[in-house]
Image (cartoon, helix red, strand yellow):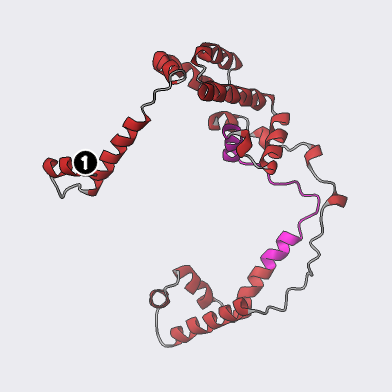
Amino acid sequence: METCVAAHRDCLRNPSPSSLLPETTRPDSGRPQDHSALVGRRAEHKKAAHALVHELLAQGNSRCAIARHLGWGLNTVLRYAAAEHAPVIYAMVRAHIATLRGAPPGTPPRPPTVRQVTGWLTRHPTALSEEDRAGLKNVLARCPELDTAAGHVRDFGELLSGRLGARLPAWIDAVDASQLPGLTGFALHLHRDFDAVTAGLTLAWSSGSIEGAVNRIKKIKRQVYGRAGFDLLRKLILLQ
């Protein structure tokens, strides 16, 4: 599905005009634009950190030694060391926030990513939030191909949860006719193990317990790798 969504990423980048809120309905943050007064414990902490870094520099310590001594990241120490005065650091934050708040009110929302849309399509509808369902509805309204792919995903989910393996040939033919990137290839490759896939979509039996035992054995092998032979590995497997 991720391949299919990536092939139609243009549908994600062009939101419909109806999905954009008019300028009059956009809420106003109501926050003052003057951020010159920086108070609080965070500001005092930054001032103290700036003074501490410069004090250690004056004592002849290197920046790497200061980072190791304080347990800070080297980039953090470099930023404090490069700032001659502590307010310079806050000015950088204020300037960045000003650019964000100065964006025009009519700016369209950020489009969803390929991975986000893939998750919307492959998760159960009841597991989606209201915002996710609204985003998926907008995407499917703009892209008929992804709308068709969503229908195939729902149908395959019904085959899997309802053990309706007899419907698998019809599902493969429908996906093949749609010629969707990624999804069509997946459906056609099911012919390689058609009997096994049909049995998996029909019978109540599962190899999950066997796979779990295999994973447990692999975990034990990794824990004693290079420290024990086969005899000890056998005892660990039998006792755990």
Point out the residue furthest to the right here. Answer: 24
Quadrant placement of the C terminus:
top left
| Picture coordinates of residue 102, whole percent (x, y) | 76, 60
| Total numbered labels placed on residues in the image | 1
Q: Residue at x 37, y 31 (%)?
A: 208
Q: Which residue is mark 1?
A: 237
Q: In terms of depth relative to the viewer, which is nearer, 169 or 212?
A: 212
Q: Is residue 219 magenta?
A: no
Left or right of 159, for residue 143: right
Pointer 1: residues within 10 angstroms few (<14), some, or many (20+)?
some
Q: Secondary structure at mark 1?
A: helix
Q: Residue at x 45, y 87 (%)?
A: 58
Left or right of 38, for residue 85: left
- Is residue 192 in view? no
Name above or below for residue 159 compared with residue 230: above
Quadrant placement of the N terminus:
top right
Q: In terms of depth relative to the viewer, which is nearer, 218 or 78?
A: 218
Occupied quadrant, residue 126? top right
Name above or below for residue 7 compared with residue 224: above
Q: Residue at x 13, y 40 (%)?
A: 230
| Picture coordinates of residue 83, whole percent (x, y) | 56, 77
| Picture coordinates of residue 218, whole percent (x, y) | 27, 40
Amino acid at dot 1: Ile
Q: In terms of depth relative to the viewer, which is nearer, 60 or 164?
A: 164
The boundaries of the magenta stretch are 95-123
- Is residue 100 in view? yes
